[in-house]
Image (cartoon, rainbow, N blue to C red):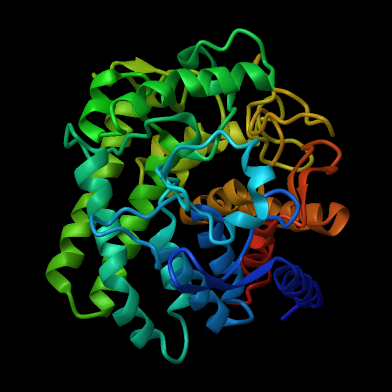
Amino acid sequence: MSARYERMRDAVRALYDRNRQRGTAPWCGLEYDFVCPSTGTYPFQWFWDSCFHTVALAHFDVGRARSEIRSLLANAQPDGFVAHVTFWQRERYEEMLATYAIAYRTPYLSDCIQPPVLAEAVAAAAQGEGGDAFLAEVMPRVVAYFEWLDARRDPDRDGLVATLQPDESGLDHTPKYDAYLGIERVEHAEFTRAWERVAGPYAEVGRDHDRMFALDRFVCADVLVNTIYAENQRVLADLLERTGDGDRAQRYRSRADATTRALVEKCYDAEAGLFYDRVGRDGRGRLRVNTVSSLMPLLLDVPAECAQALVRQIEDPLKYRAPFPVPSTALDEPGYRKPTADSKLVWRGPTWINTNWYLARGLRRHGREDLARVIEDRSAALVERSGFREYYDPFTGEGFGAEGFSWTALALDLLADLDGVR
């Protein structure tokens, strides 16, 4: 175990102690214990953030990793849905909530999804002593969640799930959505109006899924979301196998394969060497903008020619090979924006640690350990240089966005691969 890994682990432990939220929520009578994304900006429990936090926690406190998952699943709905935000301690933050553009299922639960990282998080938390008992406890709700996604978000049964508003991908202001949303000026108020053009009509139909799809305001087979969906169906299959449910494990392996095939068949543009989102209720539109989302299927078992084309993008200094890779938008895209201290628009250029976490793993799977090690090393260097920030300048390494940002602690997991700690 390297001294660098140990220093990062100690820093993550200290951060997670500061960002820990514990208590009993009067509105549901349940106890909670989770790491919030940032005490100053995001004090609540976000779905994919919490999953990433679980991965980091598993490096030094598997008990807290399991508490993170228990809190995330505590308010799972009878139909399997798990909210993308749980407002455990809402009453303390009413002024902050007034600034959020968010759709609610209840005053304490959002009515949206986020990328389904859940199975990977559960796998991390199930390591070590007591792991089998933990799986027996949580797997019914985990499976119910993935069944909900399959039933409610894949109406054409092609293996790809749809997001119904831009924030469901977690990539809120990415330039790949600009034309689809009718963005005319790159400013925060314009994106808020665009979100309201989508979410407003949904409220009028009671946020009924069939009616939201029928409105065709924003229906997106998002490449990043579906890459994570494919990977997590595969991981879920492994977990089901571990619990002795071989038949259901095989079903999820088949679903993972179907999602991967659909990404290749429907989203890959061979001429560009990139994957593009499909949009519209009929799925005929494509968002032909080169963002980090277009690289994400490198994580999966895609054909060699697809993987090689994505690697070329990552290696190209005009596109993604910045001093601190991998920027969230290709450097030569017109929509690329250098991060600034006053910008509130995310995913338009800076480097994020969570996408690096996936891309490094994909590079290793496709035999490019050399390039994976560069991303792992540079990701850790960002934290060492600028602390745990929400995102970073891909050229200078300067940190921006929320301070003490918890999912950036995935740098610890990247260091574990770099240093061979596993």
Residue under the image location 55 percent in, 48 percent down: 359
- Furthest-left residue in view? 247
Q: How many marks?
A: 0
- Determine the residue located farthest toward the bottom in the rendered image: 129
Q: Quadrant of residue 269?
A: top left
Quarter-wise, where is residue 163 in the image? top left
Q: Which residue is at a point 38% across and 82% down the rendered structure image?
A: 134
Tell me: residue 67, above or below residue 300. below
Against 319, residue 308 (above or below) is: below
Q: Is residue 341 visible?
A: yes
Instruction: List x then y, in percent, for residue 9.
Output: 73, 74
Residue 346 falls left or right of residue 182: right
User: Residue at the location (75% across, 58% down)?
Assistant: 380
Q: Nearer the viewer, residue 209 or 261?
A: 209
The reply, left or right, for residue 108 in relation to residue 207 is right
- In the rendered image, residue 247, in percent from the top left (x then y), is placed at 12, 68
**Where does the C terminus fall, quadrant-wise?**
bottom right
The residue at the point 63 percent across, 38 percent down is: 98
Residue 44 seen in the current view? no
| 238 in relation to 380, above or below | below
Question: For the N terminus, which image quadrant?
Answer: bottom right
The percent position of residue 224, horizontal first and vertical second, equals: 45, 39
Residue 38 in the image: above or below residue 204: below
Residue 25 pos. (x, y %)? 52, 68
